[in-house]
Amino acid sequence: GKCHSTPDPMNADTLIIRHFKNNSADITAFRNITNEWVQPLMEDIDRQALEDPFGLIVQKNKGALFVAEIGSNIVGVCGILMPSQTVCELVKLGVSHKAQGKGVGRKLVLHCINYARAEFKATKIELESHSSLVPALKLYQSLGFTVVTSEKCHYETADVKMEMFLPQEKK
């Protein structure tokens, strides 16, 4: 019988995406989620981000940082940087192991894409990743990112560069 099934605490129906708050709860969640995937690929810029995600991504790079919450649990993070006036870079996508396979990463990336287009007026979004992060690469491709082979990655530990053009709505 289904009557006594306990509700799934990770029910993605309740997923919300909000701006990262520069408080200890959000910082701790950012560190925990990022550490789940970044460990083998850690470099200095990652250490800076773990130290002060808000300072590096939002203040220093004029970007935006988002968290995905299910109930009161932060289950995912993703940020965007604006390295130039029109190009946006997607960074730090991470979804905690316990919430994977629920579309959290997809919703985070879509939120970042829409934000980049609407708020930052970006016409292109880029990202760098690693060929070992297969689920992430599949997600990016399913959302319309294509691999750029002509340019080298600027992160030491990245070996895949992808981009997507964002058509701006004609006024």
Image (spheres, rainbow, N blue to C red):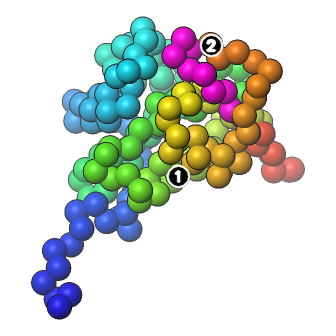
- Mark yes or no: residue 166 visible: yes
Q: Amino acid at mark 1?
A: Arg
Picture residue at 49% right of the left edge, 35% below the top: 133
The structure residue drawn at horizontal position 17% and vertical position 79%, both measured from the top left corner, is: 5
53 to 108, vertically: above or below: above
Q: Is residue 70 magenta?
A: no
Q: Secondary structure at mark 2?
A: loop
Label 1 crowd (10 A; few <14 / some 14-19 / many >=20): some
Choose between 49 and 127: the one closer to the eye. Answer: 127
| Element carrying mark 1 | helix
> As drawn, is 57 to the left or to the right of 123?
left
- Label 1: which residue? 106
Q: How many marks?
A: 2
- Distance from disc 2 to disc 1, alpha carbons, whole Å, reads 24 Å
**Mark number, residue 62:** none
Q: Position of residue 39 (x, y in %)?
A: 34, 22
Q: Residues within 10 Å of mark 2 (few under 14, many from 20)?
A: few
Outermost residue to the right = 170
Q: Earlier in the sequence, mark 2 or mark 1?
A: 1
Residue hosting label 2: 154
Residue 34 spot, x, y in % from top left? 36, 30
Residue displayed at 22% across by 36% down: 25
Quarter of the image where the N terminus is located: bottom left
Give the percent coordinates (x, y) of residue 156: 54, 11
Q: Are marks 2 and 1 in contact (CB under 8 Å)?
A: no
Which region of the structure is painted magenta? Answer: 155-164
Question: Is 58 on the left or on the right of 2, as rendered?
Answer: right
